[in-house]
Amino acid sequence: MSSAEIRKIRRVEDLGLSTSLINKLREAGYRTLEAIAVANVNELASIVGIPTPTAQRIINKAREALGLRFMTALELKKERLHIGRVTTSSKKLDELLGGGVETRTITEFFGEYGTGKTQICHQLSVNVQLPKEKGGLEGRALYIDAEGTFRWERIDAMARAVGLDPDKVMENIIWARAISSDHQMAIVEEAMDLIPKENIRLLVVDSVTGHFRAEYPGRENLAVRQQKLNRHLHQLGRIAEIYDVAVIVTNQVMARPDVFYGDPTTAVGGHILAHAPGVRIQLRRGRGNRRIARIVDAPHLPESEAVFIITDEGIRDIEE
């Protein structure tokens, strides 16, 4: 297939497949090029009922159309220079993050209760709707609320503070309450259809580990829990990369009894979660309404800290 033909492929219907095969793909949930591109070849062949070589050809076509190919480091650099970023409304926190929260990656905020994780999620859900020159992406947010912590009142106040119509802002935040780990994963699966249709540029999961931790307690359930959590994080990673979306996850912490010096708290999720996000930020309380954010892991960012405050209007810098 020539490069000109590849550029013309925008939908599943453009792949040159029969109507019956297109219908089979749609019935099986493969309704977009992105969904096909990230599919497992054996799974696709089995579900749709086609030979494995045919499934592989379909997947390859979808990947070529989306530009998922070998590239030079220089090509990668040029592509990364055009990555989108969402402001947190704090210049100090934006600087810590290299200019704001990035698309095409998972950013994790973890910390104890009351450190500002959900406040940041609310602020980003508002800010993603801002014009690009003001630090937004002119898109919508999908907010997966696993702990019942979403508050429209905060969205209202934050929207007014940045000069946006609160009702329009709330209309542009698609909210879903996850009631179990399986439900949470199912919502993310459905999001693959929703994201391109609804111009979603930010996906929030608050919190990513809560249901998994509650449903699989004890060492005897650890392996199953970690396998499911690993699958879920791969779902989120695929969405970030394929759809050019900023994915934000919050996480809880637990105390480590074997640590006698320094901070004894560590993020829930173990090695699985430690390796999945592209950027990991630890939050902790300072004096009054101050919060301290520290880069724990990010391959392209130096270890550093930033101090910000939580006000009635949202996340802000300390006035000097």
Image (cartoon, rainbow, N blue to C red):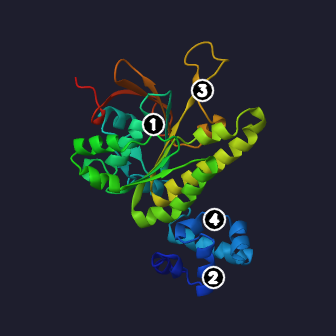
- Tell which of 187 and 67 is nearer to you: 187
Judge whether residue 18 can be spotted in this image: no
Question: Residue 120: image x %, image y %?
Answer: 39, 38
Point out the residue furthest to the right here. Answer: 220
Vertical placement of residue 286 versus 16, above or below: above
The amino acid type found where label 1 is placed reads Leu
In this picture, residue 318 sits left or right of residue 142: left
Question: Residue 89: image x %, image y %?
Answer: 30, 39
Which label's residue is closer to the chain start, 2 or 1? 2
Vertical placement of residue 118 versus 34, above or below: above
Mark 1 surroundings within 10 Å by alpha-carbon count, few (fewer than 14), some (14 through 19), many (20 or more) = few
Q: Give the residue number, with chain letter if any, for mark 1.
A: 301
Identified at 54% across, 61% down, the residue is 190
Residue 2's tag is none
The amino acid type found where label 3 is placed reads Met
Q: Could you tell me if the residues under marks 2 and 1 are in contact, i.e. CB atoms within 8 Å?
A: no
In the figure, residue 68 lies in which quadrant? bottom right
Secondary structure beneath dot 3 equals: strand
Vertical placement of residue 168 versus 66, above or below: above
Of tags 3 and 2, which is closer to the observer?
3
Q: Could you tell me if the residues under marks 3 and 4 are in contact, i.e. CB atoms within 8 Å?
A: no
In the figure, residue 308 lies in which quadrant? top left
Which label's residue is closer to the chain start, 4 or 2? 2
In the figure, residue 269 lies in which quadrant? top right
Q: Could you tell me if the residues under marks 1 and 4 are in contact, i.e. CB atoms within 8 Å?
A: no
Mark 4 surroundings within 10 Å by alpha-carbon count, few (fewer than 14), some (14 through 19), many (20 or more) = some
Of tags 1 and 4, which is closer to the observer?
4
Which label's residue is closer to the chain start, 1 or 4? 4
Secondary structure beneath dot 1 equals: loop
Residue 39's tag is 4
